[in-house]
Image: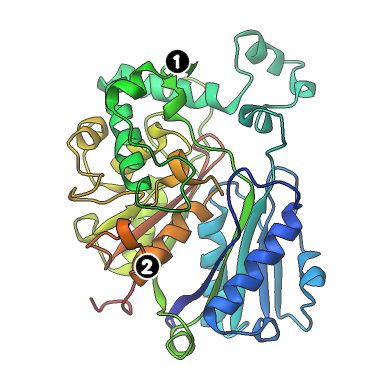
Amino acid sequence: MAETAIAGLGMTELGKVYGLSPRRFAAQAVRAAAADAGLALTDLDGLIVAPGMSGSPGVELAHTLGLRDLRLLVQMNSFGATAGAMVAHAASAVAAGSATAVACVFADAPLRPGSSAGSAYHRDAREWHGLDGLRAAHGFRSVTAYYALAARRHMARYGTTGEQLGAIAVSTRAWAAGNPRAQLREPISLRDHQESRWVVEPLHLLDCCLVSNGGIAVIVTSAERARDLARPPVYLWGWGQGHPGHRLERGSDFGLTTGAAISGPAAMKMAGVTPAEITMCQLYDCYTFTVLVSLEDYGFCAKGEGGAFAASGALGPGGTLPTNTGGGQLSSYYLWGMTPLSEAVIQARGDGGARQAPGNDLILVSGNGGVLDHHSTLIVGPDPRGRR
C-alpha cells in the first residue's frame, strides 16, 4: 500500500466559544488545515465530514467551502471513533488513487450560553417509554450513568479504585499546564479529585470531560506529496476499528473490555509494531475510566492492572508512557476523536512547546464512541513506516 501522511492541521478557537454554527466552525477548520499544509482549497479533491450532536456539518459543507469536482465526499459518524475512521478512509482512498488530498473535519457547538455542559449531552426525555422507561426509573438518564456502571463493574471484578481513576485526572491536568489552548491549567491533587462532587458514583466531576464548541480538521495526502508541502508530514503507519456490540445482559463483557482489544491489534499489525514499541499515547478520555480500560485492552498492562499502571505515574510528565500530553478531553477541550488526533499531530511535529514529550517517534491515537460501543485506532509518527 502506498504511504500516506497527515499534511495539515486546522483548529478553530475551542471551548466556550459562542456565535458560530458547527458548519461555520468546520469551514474555518478546513481552511486553516489547507493553509497549514500550504495548499489552496482548490487542491482538495476529497472531503469527509463528521457531524456532532446537532447533526451538522454534512456534505453541504462542500458548498460552503466552494469545493468543486470532488472525487470523494462522505459524511461519517461512529461518534468518538469517527476521527480515526475518517483518516483511515481518507488514507485508503489516497493509497488507491481515488483521491489525492482529502480534508477530514469534525465540528460541534453543543454549548449554549447560560446552559450547563451536562445538559448538552442529556438524553431526550421522549426516549423514556416502554423498556427504556425502566432505565429512567433507575436513574439511567445520562451517558455518565452508563460509564459509571462500566467503571463500577471493573471495580467489582478487579479491585480498581477511585483513587486510581483520580491519578489519570491528575496526570492529564499536569500535561494541560503546558498547553495554552487548555481550558483548565491549574494543577490538581488526588485530594482535589476525591473531593470534587459526585456526578454519578463512582465518577466525580474531575473524572468527566469538558464539553466544548469548535472545529478541527486534518488533510490526508500521499507521503511523497506531503514531504514537499509546508509542514513536516505525520506519517500513517496503521489503523483499525473495533465494534464489540456489548449488551447489558448476562455474559456481556461491558465494562471489562472495549473495541480497543480489536482495533489496537489490527492497527499494530498493519504498522508492524507491538505495544512495547509505542512511545506515546493520545487516548480518548471522555472519562478517566475510558483511559484505564483502553490501556489494558491495548496491551500496555495486563487486564485488571490499568489502575495500578495509572497510579504508578507512567502517564504523566516524566513517565514511561506519556499520555494525553495536551490535557486531553478532561482538561483541554472535547472535540470527540479530533482531540487526541490533533495532539498527536502536534507532538509528532515537535510543536508541543512546554508540553513536548521526548518520545514522539511512535504515537498511538484512540477514538471511542457511544458507551464503549465503537473504537478506532491510528498509529502515527514523524518518520515513514518502518523507519524511526
Q: Answer whether residue 252 is visible to the viewer in this image.
A: no
> Which residue shows up at 36% across the image and 49% down it?
324
Residue 156: where, in percent of width, then height? Answer: 32, 16
Q: Is residue 45 left or right of residue 302?
A: right
> Which residue shows up at 47% across the image and 43% down it?
329
- Decide: few, some or many residues near mark 1? Use Cα within 10 Å; few <14, some 14-19, many ≥20: some
In this figure, which residue is indicated by the disc labeled 2?
351
Residue 355: which quarter of the image?
A: bottom left
- Decide: few, some or many residues near mark 2? Use Cα within 10 Å; few <14, some 14-19, many ≥20: few
Residue type at the position of mark 2: Asp
Residue 171: where, in percent of width, then height? Answer: 29, 39
- Residue 245 numbered tag: none
Q: Is residue 77 above or below residue 247?
A: below
Q: Answer whether residue 133 is visible to the viewer in this image.
A: yes
In space, the residues marked 2 and 1 are separated at their CA atoms by 38 Å
Q: How many marks?
A: 2
Quarter holding the N terminus is: bottom left
> Which residue shows up at 31% across the image and 58% down it?
354
Residue 58: which quarter of the image?
A: bottom right
Residue 217: where, in percent of width, then height? Answer: 58, 65
Residue 272: which quarter of the image?
A: bottom left
Type of colouring = rainbow
Q: Determine the secondary structure under disc 1.
A: loop
Q: Is residue 227 left or right of residue 18?
A: left
Residue 133: where, in percent of width, then height? Answer: 71, 13
In this figure, which residue is indicated by the disc labeled 1?
201
Residue type at the position of mark 1: Glu
Q: Determine the secondary structure under disc 2.
A: loop
Q: Is residue 277 above or below residue 190?
A: below
Quarter holding the C terminus is: bottom left
Nearer to me, 13 or 202: 13
The first of marks 2 and 1 along the sequence is 1
